[in-house]
Each structure stands twice: as C-alpha cells, then as structure tokens.
Image (cartoon, helix red, strand yellow):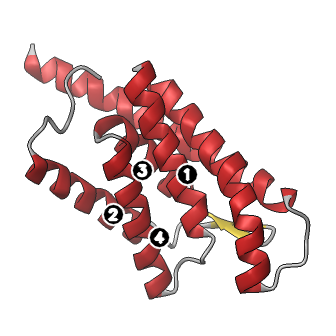
Amino acid sequence: MKNSLVKTFPLRKIVAVGLLVALGVVAAPLSIPVGVAKVYPIQHAINVLAGAMLGPGPAVMAAILTSTLRNLMGTGTPLAFPGSIFGALLAGLAFRYLKRDYFAAAGEIVGTGLIGGLVAFPLAKWILGFAGLAYAFIIPFALSSLAGSVIGVIILRLWTKTVNRNIH
C-alpha cells in the first residue's frame, strides 16, 4: 500500500483510530456466537485495516479502545481483549516488515486465532468460570479472524485501487 490513508501526521492517525473504533463499536451487534465466545468478524477486519494502514501501535490502541467500549456498553466480553490485541499487533508487524496485505491478514489470524485463543483460556477460567479445554477458544477465534481477515484484505485492495485511480 504505497499510498497510505495516513501519512505521518499524528492528528490524521488519531482521527483514523477514532473512526475505526467507532466502526468497531457500531458493528458490535454483528456477532456470531460460537461455543463460549462471541466472534466479531468486523473487529478482525478492522485489525487488518488498522495494522496495514496505521501500523502496529495504533492498531493495538484501536483494538484496546474498541474492546473497552464494547465491554462498557455490554456488547462484548472480557475475551474481546486477547481476541483483538494480539491480532492487531501481529497484523501491524507483519505488514510493516513484509509489506503485503495478506501477511497482515495472516498476522491477524495467528495473533487472534492462536495466541489470543490461548490467552483467552485462563482469562475465561478466572473471570467467567469456564471449565472447558484451552482449544475451545482457538477454533472459534481462528474462524472469526479468518472471516474478518478476508473482509479486511478485500477492503484494503478496494481502497488501494480507489486511491491509485484518483491519484493518476
């Protein structure tokens, strides 16, 4: 993504994070219950977008803010934190170093599906009283992040085509 939505001006990054957080909060009712978790494909798409367009730091900030607001509004669970933070971080790092949208998507899937799923287990056991197995989170988190990552890559590619068409 040579022509990024956000260049280096910090105010633009703050506004972009705010818009992505607002989108994540507004889209919060669009969840799919899978086992003990609610999955939010839109949040994963936002993680891919934020990671690729803004970088790992702002992507993590957007994930934390979105998860916090969803929990405060009652539309999320504490599992939203590990389910989004690690995916946003790895999506941003993967895009930063490998410069491909599909690597950002892969970072989201590994970060959310594997790492987030494993971190969610002790959190669910401690806070929610969950007595199941650790892999009970990996499968729904991975499926949700896969769906959201595909959406995120599609949006990134459409955005890039639109931006490039308007510049030339």
| Residue at the spot of label 1 | 86
Say which element carries label 3. Answer: helix
Please name whichever residue, 97 or 28, is drawn nearer the observer in this view of the structure: 97
* Disc 4 from disc 2: Cα separation: 9 Å
* Disc 4 from disc 1: Cα separation: 12 Å
Q: Looking at the picture, which amino acid does disc 4 mark?
A: Ser
Looking at the rendered image, the disc whose residue lies closer to the viewer, 1 or 2, is 1
What residue is rendered at 51% in x and 57% in y? 85
What residue is rendered at 43% in x and 76% in y? 68
Q: Earlier in the sequence, mark 4 or mark 2?
A: 2
* Disc 3 from disc 1: Cα separation: 13 Å
On screen, residue 89 versus residue 58, left or right, reads right
* Disc 1 from disc 2: Cα separation: 16 Å
- Residue 122, image quadrant: bottom right
Q: Which labelled disc corresponds to residue 46?
A: 3
Please name whichever residue, 139 or 58, is drawn nearer the observer in this view of the structure: 58
| Residue at the spot of label 4 | 67
**Residue 116 placement (x, y as % from top left):** 65, 55
* Disc 3 from disc 4: Cα separation: 12 Å
- Residue 80, image quadrant: bottom right
Q: Are marks 4 and 2 in contact (CB under 8 Å)?
A: no
Say which element carries label 2. Answer: helix
Q: Earlier in the sequence, mark 3 or mark 1?
A: 3
Looking at the rendered image, the disc whose residue lies closer to the viewer, 3 or 1, is 1
Q: Which labelled disc corresponds to residue 21?
A: 2
* Disc 3 from disc 2: Cα separation: 8 Å
Q: Looking at the picture, which amino acid does disc 1 mark?
A: Phe
